[in-house]
């Protein structure tokens, strides 16, 4: 076909490190993440395992070959990482710096849920090197928060934001949900406006996806409801308008940032960089393979204790597979990708590949090409799966 | 031969034939407790899921009677649903007697009578069996009176049982031994055996079920099929004990199977006579009356690569379903397929499901249709059952459609609602007979097309399950026919066209459009769906354009999950047909066929 002989990129640049901290106070109705109830003793054990896993991964070298062992972002996600004692968080960050070559001025993010961190704890987090907070607000309507099963009120959310600022966080992102059953265009607009009034640095708004096996999925089944895609699409358009008039740059399908405040860590995923996943259920991509860690906490810890890499799945990639993944991820960025550059990285005639796989979708107005640049047309953002499905 | 009894179990649907068969299997020790399951002879998945018998099943029961002698009782369990009455009639040719099971609560129903007459035509000894006497609603005396009045049988010969509780089962076996005559026939005459069923086995070829009337049949014999004179060497003969059980010989009077390396599917014909090549019989057996399909639909493979597979599957399925007919067909929208004929809509569904399950095919079906007779302006008469072949109405002088005469038996209190139903279905009332103080027989002439489509379900629902009906073909009558076309995105989809009575055209077009709207997934552009007669649009729906198909969250681990999801979506697309620029799922074609009841 179009493929000469695809090769792996010769240089992947510094990696990102993702650490999964799966502890939560309850379980939100829509949540399909790997989580387990908050338990200080378990958390202490778990952090030990996480640090041990880092040691193992740094020794194995495999994860770091393509990135020359360097990393410049760390992301503590969950779960609810802010439930962990700040000294445990500090241990994890130390674990990163001792086991990996963390470059100067790394971006270090922690996910925080309202009502889980005191002002003092926030200051401790800053002191341990964390410089970015991602606050899970989701909605500023208490009824909606209840339906979502969130263990906090809108008041606590607003307070948490203020506390973060007061503590000295100058890079705060807020997570919101749209398209939740019972949400209306008006309530979503109100939540977004109120959030923008807080002047966050970054905003992620996720259109709800119902995952099988969640409480929400069974609630919807019981009520005979399906999500209304049209309303969700309207909400999305409202959000795009509101954020842009507030001076945010829409840079990824679900992400908006003030200038200079894009998420450096998340950009790793979208710009075909490598990343190391650590912790139960974490995923990594080394440039040559993808892996998924064991998501069952006990199994994960047992593996680490026995000195075995705690993976449940390792999937080697071919250069072509990685290339296609890179297209899928890259097109999520509003600015799209540079086909020449991607083609060169992989030894593939990228413009021809694109032409042969999605030309009709270009005619349908879902994607847009100009010169070497390929991007989703605004209409294509909400229909991006139609484009991406051509590359799986 | 004196110790063989061949008998069928016949009844109205659900009166308990298969449950009685279960008890007979247990009492005679054919199945032990650990291998037993309810309605043991309903072996197909569809039978088990729907709780009805579709295929007749034969089992040889060893039984030591009270007279101390050892008998072989060849039992055939038969289906009760009218669509499968051909299974019953074929089964009865192998029998000398029949157990006519009657539900003690429901009494004699339409198929009780129909099956009873089938048994009489074969000169069978009929033993009435009153079942479900354990029910609180059981009224044995009333049923006995009905047996005397409706069937003209001696009610004192009836055996009262509860198949469910196992009451009276031994009496049933004794009645079979004493009242059903042993088979006649001569083992020393040349072989004369009747093929009453068959099926395909991928390893052993066609397996032929037959009843031996004269002579004997054993491995090593060279058999000859009467109709096409092909010969085969017998590899195995045997009887049915749930599974096939080889035996050294099948003799006159016995029922069993023969395996003879028959790999050419078309060599075997139901109703054909099997004889020996070196000592043939002089005359064939009478065979079976051919059944005529009454409803037709085209089957197309979803993927046109599967056309050959569908052709093979139909040929093999026909071995096991002699009432199925088919011929090649072609659609502009769907490509090559087959026009198939069925005995009713349940039969159609069963064939579709069997093709999907047993042969792993995915198909699209077109709207079922009866056969219409058209007289053209130039004087020629044509019969059509396929909307695609409907001529331009300007050439048609007169259209006629098949009518049936229905006999509906019902308790008096449902009289009004059943009348309303029949009149709504364009019925013409012919007669009312009071069978006894509470039961009425209504005789109506009805268009076949109105009876085929959900009439039975409607009848059941307006009478709370108490009305039953049976019908016979009557004649063709003048009608006002219209062809409704369906256009998707402006293009006529020939496979969705249907022939309907003009009075129903608007309603059917609207219903089809509504259902298609529900089933056709939203596409990149909005898709108009229109119903039309000739060039005139009579209904319209629109599938609005797809606005959202997005994965909002996509970070490290999400890519794997997302790719899996997209792959699954792609798999799903394989069950869809691209017609014009529009992707139409198989379910959309099926939805158009569905009756209101299924909603
Ligand atoms: N109470 C009671 N129920 C019975 C008895 N015999 C059968 N049934 C029930 O009646 C229903 C139908 O029984 P089947 O044996 O499947 O009836 P069938 O006549 O074989 O039905 P088809 O093959 O579909 O015509 C089942 O739910 C049985 O459990 C009985 O003696 N008493
Ligand atoms: S806080 Fe996040 S991870 Fe925890 S239960 Fe809720 S959605 Fe799931
Ligand atoms: Mg049955």
Image (cartoon, helix red, strand yellow):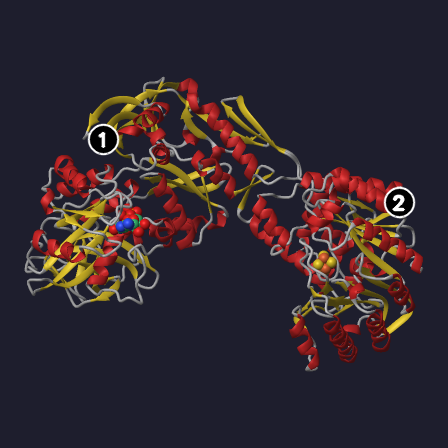
Q: Quadrant of the C terminus of chain A?
A: bottom right
Dividing the picture into quadrants, the one containing residue B246 is bottom left
Task: Residue B245: give x, y in percent of width and height.
Answer: 23, 66
Q: Which residue is mark 2?
A: A197
| Badge nearest the viewer, 1 or 2 | 1
Q: Which residue is mark 1?
A: B438
> Is any part of residue A324 visible from this angle?
no
User: In the orientation shown, which residue stands out farthest toward the bottom?
Assistant: A306
- Badge 1 and badge 2 both on one subunit: no
Tell me which chain the residue with mark 2 is part of: A
On residue B356, the disc is none
Q: Quadrant of the N terminus of chain A?
A: bottom right
Count every numbered label the image shows and give the total. 2
Q: Residues within 10 Å of mark 2 (few under 14, many from 20)?
A: few
> Is any part of residue B328 visible from this angle?
yes
Q: Residues within 10 Å of mark 1 (few under 14, many from 20)?
A: few
- Left or right, B165 with reference to A307: left
Quarter of the render that holds ligand 2? bottom right
Q: Is mark 2 within 8 Å of ligand 2?
A: no
- Residue nearest the viewer, comparing A366 with A189: A189
């Amino acid at each position: 076909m179009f493929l000469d002989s695809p090769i792996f990129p010769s240089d992947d640049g510094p990696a990102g490190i993702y650490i999964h901290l799966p502890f939560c106070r309850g379980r939100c109705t829509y949540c399909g993440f790997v989580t387990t109830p908050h338990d200080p003793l378990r958390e202490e054990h778990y952090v030990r395992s996480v640090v041990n896993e880092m040691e193992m991964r740094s020794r194995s070298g495999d994860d770091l070959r393509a990135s020359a062992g360097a990393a410049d972002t760390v992301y503590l996600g969950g779960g609810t990482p802010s439930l962990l004692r700040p000294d445990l968080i500090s241990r994890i960050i130390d674990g990163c710096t001792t086991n990996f070559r963390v470059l100067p001025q790394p971006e270090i993010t922690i996910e925080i849920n309202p009502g889980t961190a005191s002002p003092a704890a926030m200051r401790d987090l800053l002191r341990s090197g964390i410089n970015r907070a991602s606050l899970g607000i989701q909605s500023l309507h208490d009824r909606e928060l209840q339906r979502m099963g969130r263990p906090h009120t809108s008041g606590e959310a607003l307070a948490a934001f203020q506390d973060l600022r007061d503590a000295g966080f100058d890079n705060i992102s807020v997570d919101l949900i749209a398209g939740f059953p019972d949400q209306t265009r008006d309530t979503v607009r109100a939540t977004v406006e109120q959030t923008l009034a807080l002047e966050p640095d970054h905003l992620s708004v996720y259109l709800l996806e119902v995952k099988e096996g969640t409480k929400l999925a069974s609630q919807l089944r019981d009520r005979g409801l399906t999500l209304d895609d049209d309303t969700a699409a309207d909400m999305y358009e409202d959000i795009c308008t509101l954020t842009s008039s507030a001076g945010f740059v829409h840079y990824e399908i679900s992400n908006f940032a003030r200038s200079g405040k894009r998420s450096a860590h998340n950009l790793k995923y979208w710009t075909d960089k490598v990343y190391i996943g650590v912790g139960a259920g974490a995923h990594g991509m080394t440039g040559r393979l993808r892996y998924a860690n064991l998501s069952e906490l006990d199994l994960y810890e047992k593996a680490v204790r026995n000195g075995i890499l705690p993976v449940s799945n390792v999937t080697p990639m071919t250069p072509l597979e990685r290339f296609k993944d890179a297209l899928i991820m890259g097109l999520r960025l509003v600015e799209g990708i540079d086909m020449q550059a991607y083609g060169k990285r992989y030894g593939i005639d990228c413009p021809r590949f694109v032409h042969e796989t999605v030309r009709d979708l270009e005619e349908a107005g879902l994607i847009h090409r100009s010169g070497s640049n390929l991007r989703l047309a605004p209409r294509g953002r909400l229909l991006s799966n139609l484009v991406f499905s051509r590359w799986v | 031969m004196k110790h063989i009894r061949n008998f069928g179990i016949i009844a109205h649907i659900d009166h308990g034939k298969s449950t009685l068969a279960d008890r007979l299997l247990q009492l005679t020790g054919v199945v032990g407790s650990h291998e037993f399951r309810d309605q043991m002879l309903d072996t197909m998945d569809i039978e088990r899921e729907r709780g009805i018998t579709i295929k007749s099943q034969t089992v040889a029961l060893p039984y030591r009677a009270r007279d101390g002698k050892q008998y072989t009782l060849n039992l055939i369990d038969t289906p009760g649903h009218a669509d499968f009455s051909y299974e019953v009639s074929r089964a009865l040719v192998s029998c000398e007697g029949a157990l006519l099971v009657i539900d003690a609560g429901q009494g004699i129903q339409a198929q009780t009578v129909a099956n009873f007459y089938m048994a009489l035509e074969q000169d069978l000894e009929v033993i009435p069996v009153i079942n479900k006497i354990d029910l609180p609603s059981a009224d044995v005396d009333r049923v006995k009176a009905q047996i005397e009045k409706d069937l003209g049988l001696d009610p004192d010969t009836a055996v009262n049982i509860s198949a469910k509780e196992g009451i009276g089962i031994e009496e049933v076996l004794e009645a079979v031994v004493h009242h059903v005559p042993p088979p006649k026939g001569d083992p020393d005459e040349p072989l004369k055996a009747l093929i009453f069923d068959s099926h395909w086995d991928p390893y052993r070829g066609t397996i032929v079920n037959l009843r031996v009337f004269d002579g004997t049949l054993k491995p090593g014999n060279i058999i000859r099929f009467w109709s096409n004179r092909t010969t085969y060497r017998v590899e195995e003969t045997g009887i049915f004990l749930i599974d096939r059980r080889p035996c050294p010989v099948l003799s006159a009077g016995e029922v069993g199977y023969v395996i003879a390396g028959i790999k050419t599917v078309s060599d075997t014909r139901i109703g054909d006579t099997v004889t020996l090549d070196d000592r043939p019989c002089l005359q064939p057996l009478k065979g079976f009356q051919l059944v005529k399909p009454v409803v037709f639909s085209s089957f197309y493979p979803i993927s046109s690569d599967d056309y050959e597979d569908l052709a093979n599957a139909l040929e093999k399925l026909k071995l096991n379903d002699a009432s199925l007919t088919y011929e090649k067909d072609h659609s502009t929208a769907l490509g090559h397929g087959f026009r198939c004929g069925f005995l009713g809509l349940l039969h159609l569904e069963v064939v579709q499901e069997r093709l999907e399950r047993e042969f792993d095919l995915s198909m699209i079906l077109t709207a079922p249709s009866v056969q219409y007779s058209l007289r053209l302006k130039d004087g020629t008469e044509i019969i059509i059952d396929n909307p695609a072949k409907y001529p331009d109405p300007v050439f048609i002088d007169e259209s006629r459609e098949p009518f049936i005469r229905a006999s509906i038996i019902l308790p008096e209190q449902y009289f009004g609602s059943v009348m309303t139903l029949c009149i709504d279905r364009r019925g013409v009332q012919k007669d009312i007979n009071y069978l006894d103080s509470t039961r009425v027989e209504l005789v109506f002439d009805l268009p076949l097309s109105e009876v085929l489509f959900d009439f039975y379900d409607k009848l059941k629902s307006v009478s709370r399950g108490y009305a039953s009906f049976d019908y016979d073909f009557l004649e063709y009558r003048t009608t006002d026919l219209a062809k409704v076309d369906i256009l998707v995105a402006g293009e006529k989809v020939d496979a969705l066209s249907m022939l309907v009575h003009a009075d129903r055209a608007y309603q059917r077009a609207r219903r089809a459009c509504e259902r298609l709207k529900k089933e056709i997934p939203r596409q990149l552009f909005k898709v108009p769906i229109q119903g039309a007669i000739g060039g005139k649009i009579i209904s319209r729906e629109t599938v609005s354009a797809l606005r959202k198909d997005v994965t909002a969250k996509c970070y490290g681990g999400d890519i794997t999950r997302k790719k899996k999801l997209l792959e699954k979506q792609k798999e799903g697309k394989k069950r869809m047909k691209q017609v014009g620029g529009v992707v139409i799922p198989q379910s959309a074609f099926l939805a158009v066929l569905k009756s209101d009841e299924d909603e």
